[in-house]
Amino acid sequence: MSLIDSPSYQWIATPEALDDACAQLADADVIALDTEFFREKTFYPVTALVQLAGNGVTYLVDPLAVDCTPACRALLQNAALKLIHACSEDLEVLQCWAGVLPTPLMDTQVAQGFLGETPGMGFQKLVAYWLNEDLPKEETRSNWLKRPLTPAQCDYAALDVICLLEVWQHQQQALEECGRMGWALAQCQALIDQAGRSAEQDAQWFTRQRQLWRLTPRQIEAYRLMTAWREGEIRRRNMPRNWLVSDKVLFAVADAMPENRFELAAVEDVKPSLVKKDGDTLLALVKDAQRCASEALPPAWPDPARPPFKPLFKALKKAVSERGEALGMAPEMLLRRRDIEALAMQVLADEAPVLPSGWRGECLNDALTQTLKEAS
């Protein structure tokens, strides 16, 4: 009989039932977690379903009917390993619903990245890879807020956590055999540490922009201030990022550096509603950038297509790729493109390069140091 045939689960819709479920899972060594949510009209996700599995039982918790209880919060942070696949959105959902993050964590997508050269493997492909099973796809984008859920939806939701436990048994053995369990746990702990947004992260949002090299340092400062303001506002108003103002529009405003509402309205794609409601705020931030002391401005961003940045970046990227190939891992698991760019920029700014720490440092730093020596 196939694993995906007629999965068994219990529906949880009262605090008492949730506490009983948590008691059943309290001594589990591993607990699989998943969530379903809705997020088209808000910044914060609306939790529609929370799935839990461990000790041979599976629970579907209805967050529309029951809030997270103290027992459930304790379960999410007890000593059991919490399994999630591609955890970033689930962590945010659980933070909103439970007020805590699940720890200790193992992201099975991250784990797979340490076991092969395919980063970011989707869950259905992961199940097919390890279990030779084809998960149903029909309910992926169904309405999870509608009640009652259909039997097909409940089966789909239950299978996510049931299969997660089965996949982990294979991954755990493979990670231990190749000596990379510690790497995976450290990487997943870093995901927990980085979860959520902070004022410091908001201030660095501007670095995601791939066209910063087109701006002067003063324009970059204006863009930085506006994106940091926008990141705080979308949480305060609980609205999607682009519903307030997109990165593209803020970049155009920074490029134009308008001094009044007329000039702001003339910027491409700036809507009258933005000028009316938030125009004065944007103009004030542009003015703050204009008044910023030169020594306090961000550095000029190098053109990624020209020397000296391009050859240095390519050399560092090659070093990372060669190490990834030697380890049988995707190079992105070792160092992301953004991190390689940051390393190159530190060198070009005559700053001491901040090399990776922990297991990444053990894998990469000799190769990176040699590459920087040859490039100097």
Image (spheres, grey):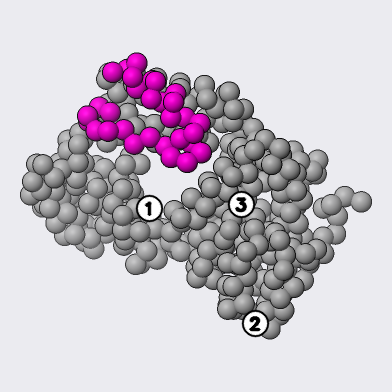
Q: Tell me the amino acid under the disc marked 1.
A: Asn
* Secondary structure state at the residue bearing disc 1: helix
Q: Residue 48: x and y, percent?
A: 60, 67
* Relative depth, front residue between 144 and 96: 96
> Mark on residue 15?
2
Return the x and y of residue 330 as percentages of the image width and height.
56, 31
Question: Which structural element holds mark 3?
Answer: strand
Q: Is residue 69 visible?
A: yes
Would residue 29 be found to the left or right of residue 265 on screen? Answer: right
Q: Earlier in the sequence, mark 1 or mark 2?
A: 2
- Give the class, few, some or many, for how many residues have Cα within 10 Å of label 2's Cα (few <14, many ≥20): some
Q: Residue at x 80, y 63 (%)?
A: 56
Which mark's residue is nearer the viewer, 1 or 2?
2
The mark closer to the camera, 1 or 3, is: 3
- At x 31%, y 42%, the residue is 207
| Residue extending farthest bottom | 16
Determine whether the residue tagged by mark 2 lies in a helix, strand or loop. Answer: helix
The residue pinned by badge 3 equals 106
